[in-house]
Amino acid sequence: MPVTPEAVSDLFLQLQSLNRSTKTMIGRQSDRLSLSTLLLLSQVQGLGEVRGSALAELLGVDTSVVSRQLAVLEAAGLTARRPDPHDGRAWLVHITPDGAQRLQDLRSERALLVAQALDDWGDAEVRQLCAQLVRLDEAFQHAINASSTGKVHT
């Protein structure tokens, strides 16, 4: 049975509201770093040493955007860079111990905030929501992949 336009509209309204709430809640604990900059720091940590151009490609943004954010992170002592030994024009960026600690602190604080917000939820409810969010994300990814290959199902 197809989803009605009204249900789709309701879903998007709820996703927008959740996005705003999440940004507000996490933004309050970001210690003056933007959420996108924190995301970049997390990516650097996960990837290890990486070129800015690779980060830009991964995040789907222009290299200049990543360069500005990396400059903020480096000025704060959260990342450092060194010349790429394979390309003297490029730099390899890595997270510093201070950057790793900042991320750990923010993740711990975020976990506490979310746990407090879900204080009256049961573990089963949280796991059920997670499963539904995974299903939604998979459906979105499928639609994205289908539209990029021209195989859109209507």
Image: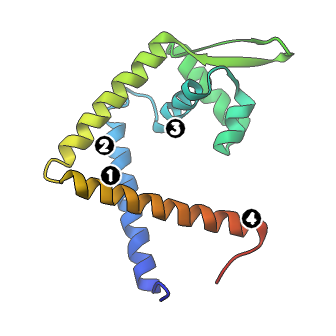
Nearer-N-terminus badge (4/1) = 1
Which residue is drawn at the image coordinates 45% and 77% (left, top)? Answer: 8
Q: Viewed as shown, does residue 92 lie left or right of 20? A: right
Report the mark closest to the observer, 4 or 3: 4
Which residue reaches farthest bottom?
Answer: 1
Q: Which residue is mark 1?
A: 21
Which residue is drawn at the image coordinates 39% and 69% (left, top)? Answer: 13
Element type at mark 4: helix
Determine the image quadrant of residue 94.
Answer: top right
Element type at mark 2: helix
Disc assigned to residue 25: 2
Residue 153, given in percent of the width and then of the height, sits at 66, 80
Nearer-N-terminus badge (2/3) = 2
Nearer-N-terminus badge (2/4) = 2
Report the mark closest to the observer, 4 or 1: 4
Q: CA distance from mark 2 to mark 3?
A: 14 Å
Q: Viewed as shown, does residue 56 lie left or right of 119? A: right
What coloring was used for the rendering?
rainbow
Disc assigned to residue 148: 4
Residue 32, given in percent of the width and then of the height, sits at 40, 28
Q: Which residue is mark 3?
A: 36
Q: Is residue 34 above or below residue 17?
A: above
Which residue is drawn at the image coordinates 53% and 27% (left, top)? Answer: 41
Mark 2: give few (<14), some (14-19) or many (20+) Cα within 10 Å: some
Mark 3: give few (<14), some (14-19) or many (20+) Cα within 10 Å: few
Determine the image quadrant of residue 61.
Answer: top right
Q: Amino acid at mark 3?
A: Ser
Q: Amino acid at mark 4?
A: Ser
Q: CA distance from mark 4 to mark 1?
A: 30 Å
